[in-house]
């Protein structure tokens, strides 16, 4: 009985703590296992929406990705970004900043939208500067690791949507940016080698080249799975 009372007191304390907005915004939803998410769907969704309402970046990212990819046929959101993705990016969620940059640049909505997408791409990388195309293979900065990590997080989220949320999933059609951007640098767009092995990321000479390349790499997420 003493153990039960202690457990009840602990549960009450945790409920009070989790109602605190500052605590709620810092809850790591990544610690919730996939088995618990799908076994306790109603409870998980209630937690997810509650955390979204108080501005938890990870929860906003998940809800925002559901809004952007509602089904197997992807429709470009255009120059207007989903509100929850905006909140997640504002909260410092790097994967959200990466997705926001790619989607906004893909929309080709003009100079102002392109500037916003460049800002989001800078947020996604910790260095704040482009890797140098003059660096030797395997050299340069480490910002490409941040982009690789962000793309991986977006990939996992999209694959989860494909596996669980989409009936009879089909390959989404991603619109490509229609412009005539050309780069004269021979090293721009080359794969980065690490330990003699090419990684699924590339070196670029400018933010515009980076964004064009990331659209291609982001679209490749959908080419790495079989669809039935």
Image (cartoon, rainbow, N blue to C red):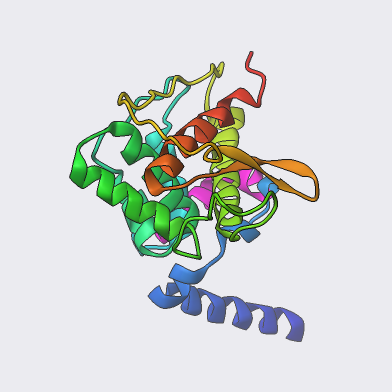
At a point 49% along the width and 79% down the height, the residue shown is 17
Classify 97 as above or below 55.
above
Asked which quadrant contains residue 129, the reply is bottom left
Judged from this view, the residue extending furthest toward the right is 196
Q: Which residues are magenta?
A: 36-51
Q: Is residue 42 magenta?
A: yes
Q: What x and y, as percent, mark residue 188?
A: 52, 40
> Does residue 47 appear anywhere in the picture?
no
Q: Is residue 151 magenta?
A: no
Classify 133 as above or below 216.
below
Q: What x and y, as percent, mark residue 216?
A: 50, 31
At a point 66% along the width and 52% down the height, the residue shown is 136
221 or 139: nearer the eye?
139
Q: What x and y, as percent, mark residue 95?
A: 49, 52
Asked which quadrant contains residue 157, the reply is top right
Q: What x and y, as percent, mark residue 155?
A: 58, 39
Quadrant occupied by the C terminus: top right
Judged from this view, the residue extending furthest toward the top is 228
Quadrant occupied by the N terminus: bottom right
At a point 52% along the width and 67% down the height, the residue shown is 27
């Amino acid at each position: 009985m003493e153990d039960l009372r202690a457990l009840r007191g602990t549960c009450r304390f945790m409920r009070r703590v989790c109602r605190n907005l500052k605590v709620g915004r810092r809850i790591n939803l990544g610690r919730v296992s996939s088995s618990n998410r799908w076994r306790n769907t109603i409870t998980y969704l209630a937690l997810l929406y509650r955390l979204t309402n108080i501005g938890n970046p990870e929860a906003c990212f998940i809800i925002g990705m559901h809004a952007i990819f509602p089904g197997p046929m992807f429709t470009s959101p255009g120059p207007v970004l989903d509100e929850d993705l905006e909140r997640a990016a504002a909260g410092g969620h790097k994967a959200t900043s990466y997705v926001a940059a790619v989607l906004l640049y893909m929309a080709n909505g003009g100079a102002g939208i392109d500037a916003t997408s460049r800002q989001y791409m800078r947020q996604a990388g910790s260095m704040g500067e482009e890797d140098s195309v003059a660096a030797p293979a395997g050299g340069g900065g480490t910002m490409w690791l941040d982009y690789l990590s962000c793309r991986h997080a977006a990939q996992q989220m999209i694959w989860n949507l494909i596996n669980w949320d989409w009936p009879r999933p089909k390959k989404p059609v991603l619109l490509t940016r229609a412009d005539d951007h050309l780069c004269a640098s021979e090293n721009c767009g080359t794969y980065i080698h690490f330990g003699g092995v090419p990684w699924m990321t590339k070196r670029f000479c400018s933010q515009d080249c980076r964004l064009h390349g990331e659209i291609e790499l982001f679209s490749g997420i959908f080419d790495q799975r079989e669809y039935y």
